[in-house]
Image: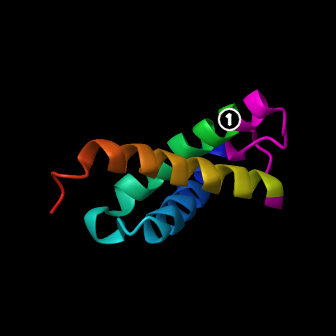
Amino acid sequence: MNFIIWLVVGGIIGWLASIVMKRDAQQGIFLNIIVGIVGAFLGGFLANMLGIGGGDINSGNLSVPSLLISFIGAVVLLLIVNMFTRGRAR
């Protein structure tokens, strides 16, 4: 069941983050899912480092704070990707 949640919620979070970061035209559904899942891991790691807690979607916690942490992690991941691909993706 967690795998399906990763795919669906990760895809939605990745898609929303790509819209916010204006990378939606450059990514397909597969990359949106990857960005959502990896962003959730990154967001959970950053939240635990900062002592915020709340978990993320990867820990099976499907609540508003966990979705927000996962979304912020996906946006941070796309910020990092934008830093490395700024001059190439045109």
Q: Is residue 53 shown left or right of residue 22?
A: right
> Could you tell me how many numbered marks the image carries?
1
Q: Tell me: 12 left or right of 84.
A: right
| Residue drawn where x is 29% and y is 41% of the image | 84
The reply to whether residue 49 is visible in this rendering is: yes
Q: Secondary structure at mark 1?
A: helix
Q: Quadrant of residue 67?
A: bottom right
**Mark 1, other Cα within 10 Å: few <14 / some 14–19 / many ≥20:** some
As drawn, the residue found furthest toward the top would be 49
Q: Nearer the viewer, residue 75 or 38?
A: 75
Query: What percent of the width, then of the height, locates residue 76?
Result: 53, 48
Task: Please check the rendered image and state whether residue 45 is part of the magenta-colored stretch, yes or no.
Answer: no
| Quarter of the image where one finds residue 26 | bottom left
Magenta span of residues: 46-64
Residue 34 at least partly seen: no
Residue found at x 72% / y 57%: 68
Q: Which residue is mark 1?
A: 46
In the image, residue 45 above or below residue 77:
above
Quadrant in the picture for residue 42: top right
Give the residue drawn at x 59%, y 52%. Answer: 4
Amino acid type, residue under disc 1 in the picture: Leu
- Which x, y percent locates residue 34? 44, 47
Which residue occupies the foreground of this view, 30 or 49? 49
Is 11 situated left or right of 6 in this image?
left
Q: Quadrant of the C terminus?
A: bottom left
